[in-house]
Image (cartoon, coloured by chain):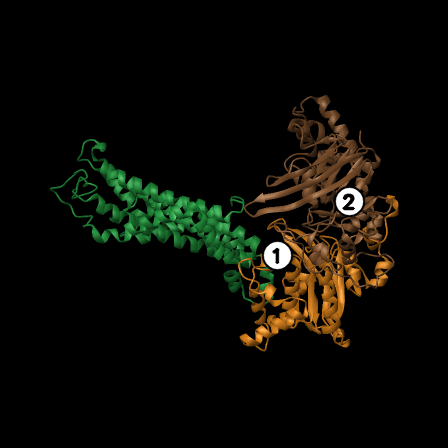
Amino acid sequence: MINEDVTGSDDVLLKCENLTKIYTSGLIRTKTVAGAKNVSFNIKKGEIVSLAGESGSGKSTVAKMILMLLRPTSGHIFLNGKDISLYNIRDYYRQVQAVFQDPYSAFNPFYKVDHVISRAFGLRQDNPDEDERKEIIESTFLSIGLNPSEVLGRYPHELSGGQMQRLLIGRSLLIGSQLLIADEPTSMIDASTRAGVLNLLLRLKEKEGLSVLFITHDIGQAQYVSERVLIMKEGEIVEQGSVNDVFTNPNHPYTQELLASVPSLYEKWEELT
Amino acid sequence: MIEMWELLLKSRKAIFGLVVLIVFILLGTVGPLFVGDPYNMNLNQMGRPPSLAHILGTTSFGQDVFAQLCNAVGNSLLVGLVAGVLGTLIAVFVGAVGPYIGGLADRISNLVTNLALVLPLIPLFIIIASVVRGLNLVLIGIILAVTAWPWAARSIRSQMLTLKEREFVNLARMSGDRAVRIVVTEILPNMMAYIMMVFVILTGTAILTESALSMIGVSTTPTITLGYMLYWAQHETIVPFWWNIWWWFIPPGIVLTVILTAFFVIHAGLDEVFNPKLRRV
Amino acid sequence: MTEHILEVEDLRGYYRGVFGVVRAIDGVSFNLDRGTIMGIAGESGGGKSTLAQLVSGSPPPLLHREGGRILVDGIDIYNIDPEELRTEVKCKRMSYVPQASMESLNPVKRIRDFIFDVVGQRTGRRVRSKERKAEILEMAANHVKTLGLNSSVLDLYPHELSGGMKQRVVIAISTLWNPKLLVIDEPTSALDVTSQKRMIKALLKLKRAGIIESMLYISHDLTSLRQCCARSMVMYAGKVVEIGSMDETINDPLHPYSQLLGAAIASYDPKGRRQDTLQSIPGSPPDLRNPPSGCRFHPRCPYAMDICKTTDPPMFTVGNGSRQAACWLLKSKAGE
């Protein structure tokens, strides 16, 4: 069934409706764990939305369902108003791509990093020849601050975490995707280069109109990079709204507790002094 | 991958094992062309000790021991190779494909593995040998392969289960790749080291198992293998004391030991190269 | 009795192996006053954990102390009998809780039995008698309670505890002998924010209860260091770049690296989002097998001068003497 009201607003890119994922384990005596419960939200075109929560809150489950790596137990996801299960898989991945938490796991250690890039060309419809590919790669890499000669032809372990994450962002640009699912993209890279990745996402949003679902446990980064935020706890979205509202004036008790626990560079916890 | 080969060539153990093995492969393949008919019984030359004419002497049936040894080495290695290649293929197929697809496919492949794991080899072999007429070496290799793969499939499965969770597999799925392609181009290359080890172990143990079975007289092929030589050396009755005809059973015994040692030294070398815990820092 | 619980003088610690010589700690000197919590900040590869391993007295196999002294409570720990180090310094005067130490609990033993094992190993005498066990349990229960846990956790198995609880149990065991100094490496990095806060509170309570006196707290997370440390030391590429009070280092950093590191962190501000854009530091940390000449930060430093490329800056003392930083820019400020 295709929900009609989605088509009403043009600028909604992705809409999740009552997404639920229940994990079942065991053959005879089954045990069920809810990874996500009735998760509903949408992402507009050219918007960065943060999905924040602690480990085990179901953030990655939601990401995997959007990326069609997991099938939801119930609920629907719509991209541009069309249920994603109706998409041709290659058409879908042309529009939705991801950057994962662990860059070292995202590259196959067996191949040079070029492998990931050249596989990505398979999703493009224009099928460029060798020279055109080279040109596209160079211009894309330069636009995201990567020097092609520094990264191409190397093995993953020869690159830094920041370079790898940029490469993956570059990969999704090559494909021309509209939505990037960024699952904790900065948590394994050094503080001094982290800002570069965050700024790159902001710039791509401004210049290319890229939409990003920024999944993080770091409230500071969510506050820096996004306009809207969803707070998840135990598989449910407990609060959502604009970053300014949620982070300065939280309503839900869990959000209040979470924010009170976040250390800030600018303030000290009073109860400790 | 290039690095792996470089590392492998740095491992003295692996090189030593490979060199020994190559010598025996040459002996088993080229050797038979230069020696006489190993089955030819020369009734004038029965049970003779090593001499210039017969450098390893003759059997009590007047056959040349060296000619038999060359053929036996080749045949034993052939059995090992058939069992090794086939066993590895089965192990990779059962251990990798089912678990990658997951769900029912994984359950079925796991069940098949566990069933095969509990098959008793020697009784099975005795039954097959008594039922099947015209057993040949390739058939023996196949039977050995069919009974030897389960442990390897299990460990390949466990590797598969961790590798398929790696993000590069997800990334390949998001490049629109199909399951078979992902298994072949993304996952299996990362297991190559392990698969090589499986092959070495399966080949080595198949040679040993075939020899053991022939030696106790279970194998009914008329083809000479190392175990077959040992069987006849034990069962001949012409010479009164076994040590009087030492040149008959000592060469195949030593050769078998050396070949197996070579296999296990290669295995140790591979382990040293691919197991980060053993890799010398 | 000296006023410093820990004195480190010109310490050098190198990793040696077939990969070459990694100069992970290259000339580090600092003092830690009694009763102070000092935070060590910096990125990975800065040498924080290596420093802690050297201070612990038993560095891992490939790490070697190549020079310098470490005095714990006045005892030169690399110049005494190993037996004395074990009985007199470790646990009594100093305890070291390494990174990911919560995985060191024995999974098949109840916490209490694990504690008896640890005590037995430490004292060289197995814990057998009932009285001794009761005595140890009481001590452990006291520590566990101070850290905000119910003493019944001692009867549980490690898998029944959450990550934060396991971490606190390990700290309780490490501080069983009431060490004067606790050296703790990344106690919060594996925890969620809410447990991180609990962890930091627990550590401060440990100090307030008099179980420990001083603490060396190592973390890559400047924001959590900020919450509990009075003093701070920033490390870069095996060297100390700045030492001073935490507030001053955050609000008015002296060394360009501290300035840039502070400007690169997206910190949560409860008052609303800051408008300024974060800056990342160009380049990447140097290869310590072959560190750059002069100041190790000069290839990434926006203020690099000619002298920075050739000569390693000494620590310049600034202000009333409580702040030090190794940067040539401070030469004029520091009345030398």
Chain identifier for the green-coloured part of the image: B
At numbered mark 2, what does the secondary structure look like: helix, strand or loop? strand
Q: Quadrant of the C terminus of chain A?
A: top right
Tell me where residue C40 sits by quadrant: top right
Residue A207 in view in this figure: yes
Residues indicated by labels 1 and 2 sit on the same polypeptide chain: no
In whole angstroms, how far apart are the C-alphas of marks 1 and 2?
29 Å
Identify which amino acid the numbered label 2 is placed on. Gly
Q: Residue at x 56, y 59 (%)?
A: A155
Which residue is more in the foreground, C195 or A198?
A198
Q: Which residue is mark 1?
A: A104
Which residue is more in the foreground, A49 or C206?
C206
The percent coordinates of residue C84 (x first, y second) are 68, 26
- Please tell me whether mark 1 or mark 2 is closer to you in this view: 2
Identify which amino acid the numbered label 1 is placed on. Tyr
Q: Quadrant of the N terminus of chain A?
A: bottom right
Q: Which residue is mark 2?
A: C39
Eyeballing the image, is B58 above or below C93?
below
Chain identifier for the brown-coloured part of the image: C
Q: Colour of chain A?
A: orange
